[in-house]
Image (cartoon, grey):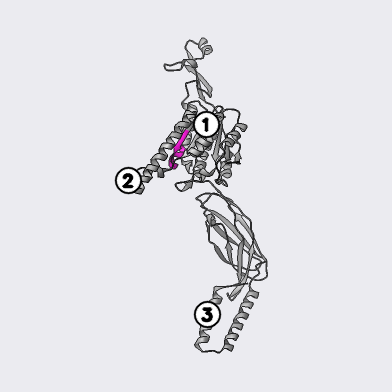
Amino acid sequence: MALTGRLAVVAALLAAALFAVSADWRTFWLANLALAVLVLLDVLLAGSVRRLVLARSGDSGVRLGESATVTLTVTNAGSRRARLAVRDAWPPSAGSVPRVHRVTVPAGERRRLATVLTPTRRGDRRPARITVRSVGPLGLAGRQGRHVAPWQVRVLPPFHSRKFLPERLNRLRQLDGAVLIRGRGQGTEFDSLRDYVDGDDVRSIDWRATARRENVVVRTWRPERDRRVVLVLDTGRTSAGRVGDSPRLDHAMDAALLLGALASRAGDQVELLAYDRVQRVRVPGGSRGELLSRLVNAMAPLDPVLLEADHAGIVAAVLRRHRRRALVVLFTDLNTAVVEEGLLPSLPALTQRHTVIVAAVADPRVAEMMHGRSSAAEVYGAAAAERATAERRRLVALLRRRGVEVVDAPPESFAPAVADTYLALKAAGRL
């Protein structure tokens, strides 16, 4: 049984009236008894909660920052009309509106209740039990019960860097078609023959074709297609650190989506690996049309693990699956513990076989702190920021001496910087 606010109001008004007329205790008892009878009658006349059938339908996926609609269908299989207050409980991060639906469902009919979700976090959002209160005709009391209607809404990464994709695709078309690579370069494919012009590399001369013609002929080369690009997300504790409004892992996902979309359009095979102490997600290469959908669905439930990442395990996982040369893009952080203690000991085995990019998001707040001079606290903060920046530059130089390409950029330019590095390597024939 459930009591309503109307009962409290009626009881207060009744008590005030009895006090005003100086009623004796017998009158108070009779008034309470009458009120109790009304409450019991209201409960008995209320529609049955147990005879309600609840089911869900609607959106099962939404991008972070957008809204989804989930419909709850309430069917009254009882014999009385049901005046209902339905509390559809979702996690706070689901951003559900409204929290309570008020609806009247006649016997044998159904009503649809729409809940709009605007999630604030990635991942799978599932509702809790549905609390239903059926109020009697007097509105004093009613019946209350709980129902379960399973559903799941997967909140996908937002892919903010999609806006950079058309420009990079245009550059890719120039690289792959109109602008041919003249040098022989490692990792390039033969494209066509043409006459020699001043400045061409003599090593590109095709002597057999030249012997058949009057002019010297050179071979032209284009970037190789069907190369392998391995996107590795470090989901260890450093990926939980927030840069701006989002964790480092979310910035890494956004850059990985842009690079994955670009590389698949270039004809390369893209694979995703998420790893900390164990493998969390692996998405093998597939068709270009399905790749982006598979990547965002695999990334959606990923959360950082508050443990140090096992970089030796990451390297071993990549080497087990990829014996042919590939481009390995490791999204991680640039700090001493990650680079010197974790990554460097395992790096030679990886760079010996593959081309490696280490991509890390730089915190723009550190750059802002470097200019603080108005107070003693800001001066100390500026000194700490200078030291952190110098240490970061040292680690970048250390990685580059080991043959690793490094991308270190703030959030707004991080994803396009990773894509530009990929295009530069492709243009240089280093993939």
Identify the residue at image location x=45%, y=37%.
408
Lower sequence index among marks 3 and 2: 3
Lower sequence index among marks 2 and 1: 1
Mark-to-mark CA distance, 3 and 2: 64 Å
- Local crowd at mark 2 within 10 Å, few (<14), some, or many (≥20)? few
Mark-to-mark CA distance, 2 and 1: 39 Å
Q: Is residue 280 above or below residue 214?
A: below
Where's residue 327, x and y in %? 54, 31
Q: Write the start and end of the magenta stretch as one range.
A: 406-416
Q: Quadrant of residue 126?
A: bottom right
Identify the residue at image location x=56%, y=64%.
101
Q: Look at mark 2 in the image and give the residue it sits on.
A: 373
- Local crowd at mark 3 within 10 Å, few (<14), some, or many (≥20)? few
Where's residue 249, x and y in %? 51, 43
Q: Which mark is residue 356?
A: 1
Q: Look at mark 3 in the image and give the residue it sits on.
A: 12
